[in-house]
Amino acid sequence: MANTIKNQADILAKLQIKALNPMQEEAIKVIEQTENTLLLSPTGTGKTLGFSLPLLQTLNPNSKEVQALILVPSRELAIQIEQVIRTMGSGYKVNAVYGGRPMSKDKIELKHTPAILIGTPGRIADHFSNNRFSKDHIKTLILDEFDKSLEVGFEYEMRGIINQITSLNKRILTSATQGVEIPDFVNFKNPKTVNFLQEKRTSQLSFKTVVSPSKNKLNTLLQLIQHIGNEPGIVFCNFKDSIAEVHHFLESKNISHACFSGGMEQKDRERSLIKFRNGTCQLLIATDLAARGIDIPEMKYIIHYELPKHQEEFIHRNGRTARVNEKGTAYILRWEKEYLPAFIKESKGVSIAKKAHYKPQYWETLFISGGRKDKISKGDIAGLFLKQGGIKKEELGVIELKPDCAFVAIPLALADGLVAKLNNRRLKKKKVRVTLL
């Protein structure tokens, strides 16, 4: 059963959104009136809000069962959607389940059944096969980034899941890519398509080519980073071994950064994103796993350190900058003897001889061993740092609150002193550990 239900106006006010964009307005209208909706829109245009707002209208506040299922291809996308819907403060319980975290956590959360369940197909299939909740009340199915789910091999699990849901009356499929074939098992008959992929936003994205005189492009990458300065951005690589190479090089040059790839543990990936979001690191060195489906802010630029093999990867990487109405730059870093793929047009070259003033790392991230389940709020954490830690309000950075822990950005110069002062202090009724992340 839901708590106090909020309407769309209340939700937008809470999100501090004055007006929906045209894609969101059309998506909401179509989804409300249509059984099967195909929503096509570039990465970063707000598809999650576009399908979540009409989804809330389909829910029964008196039901104690799962009413909507959202299947996603990655843990990061599951977490992102959960955070968006939680932030909406709709009054409905929402949970995300995914591989890579203890099954015991899922079981605890599912004892208090959410109205909206988000998950990766493998983990959802496990819960289905063990009958951990009723499937009989699921009326709405959303396949977000469904083409990516097929691409990474989730067709078998998705087929099994969909075949077990017998009460569906609404299906929503989303993608940032045109022309993906929809398998028959989705039962996606006579869909209405909302297509914003052809919207002309290319003028917001500028391409610049940086030529490396050496096949080893590390020094040129460093010069480019120093040329750009302290703007947040993503450096895309094709392989996790390349990330390791870039990581060790930048570390030796004292360039603050975080890494993100499928070869990392889920916990480490999440912590890299936390440090990137709160400004502890301004560079994310990543594979194409970071090209979509993760919760990070607007990027001013991305760098193709290694050129993508396929056009789809190129499109999704570029979608991390120049999102919605913002401007951004995609830097194409190539060796002077390297040929560009046919889908990458030669763009204006840029000189990187001039360097911006590159500031050293300012923020550091602290870990706190208490979260929402301990009835701890962001206000409680702020009070701990301001009153007991003795720091100024402007020295308190971004606070991210999780179910069982929290992360706080504070000035690097104060980090060790705050750990010594606050570790093992009481926060609400719990004695918490405070450590460097």
Image (tube, helix red, strand yellow):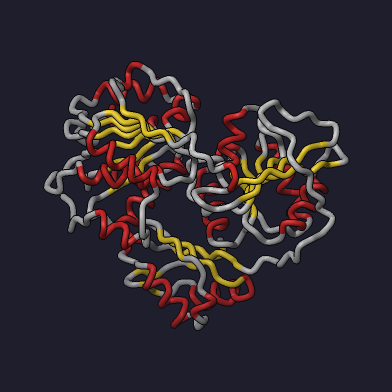
* Residue drawn at (71%, 37%) of the image: 306
Outermost residue, top side: 184
Outermost residue, right side: 213
Q: Position of residue 309 (x, y in %)?
A: 66, 28
Q: Quadrant of the C terminus?
A: bottom right
> Quick check: can you spot residue 373?
no
- Between 429 and 98, the one nearer to me in the picture: 98
Q: How many numbered circles are shown?
A: 0
Report which quarter residue 69 is drawn in: top left
* Residue drawn at (73%, 45%) of the image: 246
Report which quarter residue 289 is drawn in: top right
Q: Position of residue 323 (x, y in %)?
A: 52, 48
* Residue drawn at (26%, 58%) of the image: 9
Direction from residue 88 to residue 241 in the image, left or right: right
Q: Position of residue 131 (x, y in %)?
A: 23, 31
Up/down of 376 relative to 420, above or below? above
- Between 76 and 49, the one nearer to me in the picture: 49
> Quick check: can you spot residue 135?
yes
Q: Position of residue 120 (x, y in %)?
A: 39, 35
Direction from residue 315 to residue 57 in the image, left or right: left
